[in-house]
Amino acid sequence: MDFFKPKFFTGIKTYTGKQFVSDLVAGVIVAIIALPLSIALAIASGVSPEKGLYTAIVAGFVISFLGGSRVNIAGPTAAFATIVAGIVATSGIDGLVIATIMAGIILIIMGVCRLGALIKYIPHTITTGFTSGIALTIVIGQIKDFLGLTFVPGTNAIESIEKLEAIGKSINTFNWQALLVGLIGLAILIVWPRISKKIPGSLIAVIVGVVIVKVFKMDVNTIGDLYTISAKLPPFTLPGLDMAKIVSLIPDAFTIAILAGIESLLSCVVSDGMIGDRHNSNTELVAQGLGNICSALFGGIPATGAIARTAANVKNGGRTPVAGMVHALVLLLILVVLMPYAAWIPMPIIAAILFIVAYNMCEWRQFVRICRTAPIGDILVLVVTFVLTVVFDLVVAIAVGMVLAAVIFLKKMSDSAHVRLWKKKTEAPSDSRLKDVPENVRVFDLDGPMFFAASDVFAAIPVDEGVSAVILRMHGVPSLDISALRSLEKVHTSVTEKGARLILAHVNEDPLKVMRHAGFVSALGEENIVPTVDDALALAKTL
């Protein structure tokens, strides 16, 4: 069980009353920040507002209690909004529960199999591309409420392109009062952080928006106009199990699991740098899995580590998982006492909050920097992932992005592999660096990884008539796969048929292991594998 070591249990032994006060303050502040965000993200995900709080309460508590980070705060995040909305639209709430539970199981398996470190193999261009794409889809999804539009009856816009078409068709229903409230909320969200860092601007924007709409009796949709608000405790529910539905939701479950893993571990890495600690990635994955399963069973939606809330936790003194647990309990209290008043929140304010969330997550500076400075292949991966995220969905974007990145990487690696024929000292007598190579010997330098995409480089090893030995200097070959070994075997056959001898020098450990396992060393002869090129030349001179 060394893969599962929750930070709560390792840190509680030295816990003090002073630290509890700091964690308590941080937990309360983070809960205040999470309140409007959880409601807004639930609405953006196509579910009722209280489900966002259920997620922050249940998943937030479980992940803090069992997680591999001391300060990571979990809950609903913007990254899941479009995925959840798509699942709800096509498979209903039961489908979302099933997909989230399966994603939780996948995360647990990843943690048990110690796959936490594998997240680093997802290229930065892909994470930047889909993060920026998700941000844009969130913005597109909130234009309707920000402008107060009324869609044509029967409109079922799920994809971003469909939403843009629906907006275009309904633009004549524009409500200037809704836009005014949204602009006021947006201005507060932009300006307020310069006034106070302690009180979140989203809370101020919600209060001001409610007051304006109520006092001036404005014709603006509120949460209560569109949703039925529930102040009940998170209810335990089991979904109806349908094997066909389970199979159809497997791709969505993997998407949720991968995204939850990426975002939570990125949040852990950021917080590690802030507090000088080191998280346990496999423990965090198991906790994320358990948290998502519990969230789904208690009426919530997918959850993961939230970087902004985690940073707020650290900045306000949170240093142990207790702060995250306090944040969940405070939200539970708010749910029971204040949730009915959430019905007063104007929808344009929710849209404004999500606009800021999208801006903060879009990484546009990083996007522009990559486009300006990166190689064309990296730019292609970035743009393709971004476009596919917006036009199709995250499943397609990540799959195509990974395949494209892998192909470009293989191309780069194959281009770096090459064969070079040594010059003889007699051809350049003034160059003291050259070895004295006999006339009947050929020496080739092999450089770069030798694998299936680069195995054709062996074709550049000609065997002339009258040559008694061909020496391959393999010091620059870090790895060798079975396809490249097959090409090397062909070189050996060709050399042998010409009555010459193949000698390998400077063979690294990994390629040598592959050669031994495949039986090539036995076919070549142990005596023909020597430590240095000098040894190879000495052997060749005896032929």
Image (cartoon, rainbow, N blue to C red):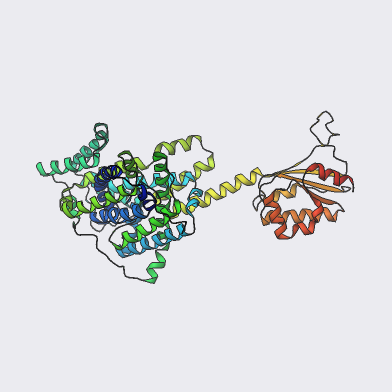
Please provide percent x and percent y for residue 421: 77, 41
The answer to which quarter of the image holds residue 425 is top right
In the image, residue 97 above or below residue 177: below
Q: Where is residue 531 in the image (x, y as percent from the top left)?
A: 77, 46
Which of the two residues, 76 or 251, is positioned nearer the viewer here? 76
Question: Is any atom of residue 18 visible in this view?
Answer: yes
Task: Give residue 442's position: percent from left, percent from top.
Answer: 82, 44
Relative to 505, 129 lies left or right? left
Location of residue 363 by image quarter: top left
Instruction: Say whether residue 213 is left or right of residue 19.
Output: left
Eyeballing the image, is 210 above or below 232? above
Instruction: Determine if residue 89 is in view.
Output: no
Query: Is 458 situated above or below 230?
Result: above
Q: Residue at x 20, y 51 (%)?
A: 334
The residue lying toward the viewer, choosing from 27 and 356, is 27
Residue depicted at x 20% and y 40%: 204
For the point 60% across and 47% down, which residue is it? 411
State the image coordinates of residue 400 (x, y, percent, origin top left). 49, 52
The count of marks equals 0
